[in-house]
Image: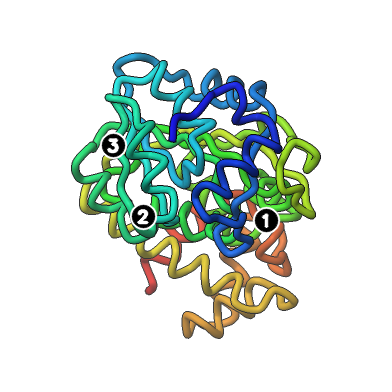
């Protein structure tokens, strides 16, 4: 079942491949195939892929990104859950590509421990975006960077600014410098999804941490979850209730750091969260 790379951008050819593999594009697995090479080139450019890089990809499908990565990177490690694609890849896998079959969420830790120094470049299925990002950022051996195409709405949440923050945006911005690269309209996919996509790039900060820094991470996310526990409530109330702290202590702390003791969780910057956690770590 030999592939023709340029034809991977054509819906008719993709339909033929699906028929040969007894495959119907699955909403469950987010199987929407990109039809434009310009966004593949943009992802590779932004990730600064070179011939010494080890790349982790998730959900290769028929390989529109995989084959392009294989031409530039030293080695590509990719996870695919759809086993109907095995005959296709047995025929077409490049020499510098390793395919692992199964759920990427269950495999990224073992892969990261083996690679240690690597980049993530992937068109992520919408349904697992948040879960995959949390899994990658929780790893002992985090990637040096993450370049991904995701649902536009999720991308906008990830790059949000104070006033519109969420646990997702604070968590990712805590671990990395994030930027929106470009939007990708839904007309660039087959089957056509209901929503647009976007490419974002994350440069990971402090990839390797000492034990005391890891302990701080645990405290940071404990406080963060408490702060966002009830979105409609003011932050002081969430922190005092969830962390069993006196109201006055929390309100004074928030006034000192944020200038407003009645501020809500979505209004804080990552630096303000870090300052709050440092203060609270002395009383928790």
Colour scheme in use: rainbow
Name which of mark 1 and mark 2 comes first in the sequence.
Answer: 2
Q: Which of 7 and 280 lies nearest the eye of the viewer?
A: 7
Q: Position of residue 275 (x, y in %)?
A: 50, 53
Q: Which residue is mark 2?
A: 138
Q: Is residue 282 left or right of residue 35?
A: left
Identify the residue position indicated by label 1 in the image: 165
Frontmost residue, 134 versus 34:
34
Foreground tag (1 vs 2):
2
What kind of element bears circle 1?
loop
Q: Are marks 1 and 2 in contact (CB under 8 Å)?
A: no
Instruction: Tell me how many marks there are.
Output: 3
User: Label 3 vs label 2: CA separation?
Assistant: 23 Å
Tag 2 secondary structure: loop
Residue 34 coordinates in the image, percent (x, y):
65, 37
**Where does the image place residue 73, in percent across and percent down from the top left?**
36, 20
Q: Are marks 3 and 1 in contact (CB under 8 Å)?
A: no
Q: Residues within 10 Å of mark 3 (few under 14, many from 20)?
A: some
Q: Which residue is disc 3 drawn over?
A: 98
Cβ atoms at labels 3 and 2 below 8 Å apart: no
User: Residue at the spot x=33%, y=52% of the render?
Assistant: 101
């Amino acid at each position: 079942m030999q592939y023709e790379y340029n034809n991977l951008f054509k819906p008719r050819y993709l339909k033929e491949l699906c028929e040969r593999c007894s495959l119907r594009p699955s909403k469950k697995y987010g199987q929407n195939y990109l039809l434009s090479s310009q966004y593949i080139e943009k992802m590779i450019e932004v990730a600064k892929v070179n011939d010494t890089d080890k790349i982790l990809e998730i959900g290769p499908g028929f390989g529109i990104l995989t084959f392009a990565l294989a031409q530039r990177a030293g080695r590509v490690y990719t996870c695919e859950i759809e086993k109907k694609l095995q005959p296709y890849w047995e025929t077409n896998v490049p020499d510098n590509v390793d395919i692992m079959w199964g759920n990427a969420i269950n495999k990224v830790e073992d892969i990261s421990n083996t690679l240690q120094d690597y980049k993530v470049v992937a068109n992520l299925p919408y349904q697992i975006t948040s879960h995959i990002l949390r899994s990658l950022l929780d790893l002992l051996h985090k990637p040096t960077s993450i370049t991904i195409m995701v649902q536009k709405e999720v991308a906008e949440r990830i790059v949000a600014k104070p006033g519109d923050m969420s646990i997702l945006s604070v968590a990712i911005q805590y671990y990395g410098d994030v930027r929106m690269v470009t939007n990708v309209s839904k007309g660039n996919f087959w089957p056509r999804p209901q929503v647009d996509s976007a490419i974002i790039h994350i440069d990971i900060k402090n990839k390797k941490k000492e034990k005391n820094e890891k302990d701080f991470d645990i405290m940071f996310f404990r406080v963060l979850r408490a702060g966002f526990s009830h979105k409609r409530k003011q932050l002081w109330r969430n922190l005092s209730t969830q962390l069993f702290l006196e109201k006055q202590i929390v309100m004074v702390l928030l006034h000192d750091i944020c200038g407003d003791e009645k501020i809500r969780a979505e209004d804080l910057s990552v630096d303000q969260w870090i300052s709050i956690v440092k203060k609270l770590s002395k009383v928790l």
